[in-house]
Image: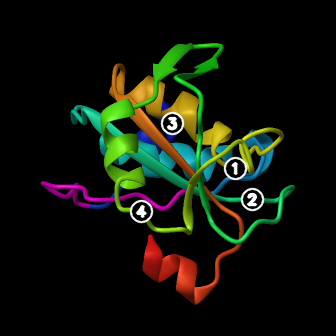
């Protein structure tokens, strides 16, 4: 990550509202992801929403992980139960609390060590989209 950050010639924005990061395996896109995450260094976020596609499960909706935490080799990341409840309270039939997309999916999981390294402690809301239709994107 330090190498990626040191090669950054871009002006760092004062506020960051979102980050689009690749989700291929680290040998293929890790350097690019590290470059993007370097923009988060020295910033604090209490809540992080990670939205990813599903490569293994097809379902017509946006799945919110029913677990209470994710664990990586860098430690445990608590799922933001309060934010999850707010999403589910919208009563949108496309927003579901389900394991769909959260089992063997790598797209979300490859982001977590980068977040842990750059942010330290935060709460997570992991969302997986069963497909990326216009309707689902607008729902999100």
Q: Give the spatial CA distance, label 3 vs label 4.
A: 45 Å
Q: Position of residue 37 (x, y in %)?
A: 43, 44
**Residue highlighted by disc 3:** 3
Q: Are marks 1 and 4 in contact (CB under 8 Å)?
A: no
Q: Position of residue 8 (x, y in %)?
A: 38, 52
40 inside magenta stretch:
no
Q: Position of residue 85 (x, y in %)?
A: 36, 42
Q: Residue at x 57, y 55 (%)?
A: 96
Q: Give the spatial CA distance, label 2 vs label 4.
A: 22 Å
Note whether 115 is above or below 56 in the view shown: above
12 inside magenta stretch:
yes
Q: Which residues are magenta?
A: 11-21
Q: Give the spatial CA distance, label 1 vs label 4.
A: 26 Å
**Residue highlighted by disc 1:** 107
Give SS at disc 1. Answer: loop
Q: Give the spatial CA distance, label 3 vs label 2.
A: 30 Å
Pick the quarter of the image with the C terminus.
bottom left
**Residue highlighted by disc 4:** 91
Can you see residue 87?
Answer: yes
**Residue highlighted by disc 2:** 54
Q: Residue at x 59, y 40 (%)?
A: 65
Q: Residue at x 48, y 21 (%)?
A: 77
């Amino acid at each position: 990550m330090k190498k990626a950050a040191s090669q950054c010639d871009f002006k760092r924005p004062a506020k960051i509202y979102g980050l689009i990061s690749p989700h291929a395996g680290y040998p293929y896109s890790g350097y690019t992801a590290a470059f993007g995450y370097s923009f988060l260094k020295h910033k604090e976020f209490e809540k992080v929403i990670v939205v990813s596609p599903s490569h293994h499960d097809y379902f017509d909706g946006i799945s919110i992980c029913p677990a209470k935490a994710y664990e990586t080799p860098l430690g445990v990341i608590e799922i933001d139960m309060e934010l999850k409840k707010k999403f589910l309270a919208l009563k949108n039939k496309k927003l579901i609390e389900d394991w769909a997309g959260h089992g063997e999916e790598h797209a979300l999981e490859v982001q977590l060590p980068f977040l842990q390294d750059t942010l330290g402690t935060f709460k997570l809301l992991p969302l997986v989209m069963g497909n990326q239709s216009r309707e689902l994107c607008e729902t999100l």
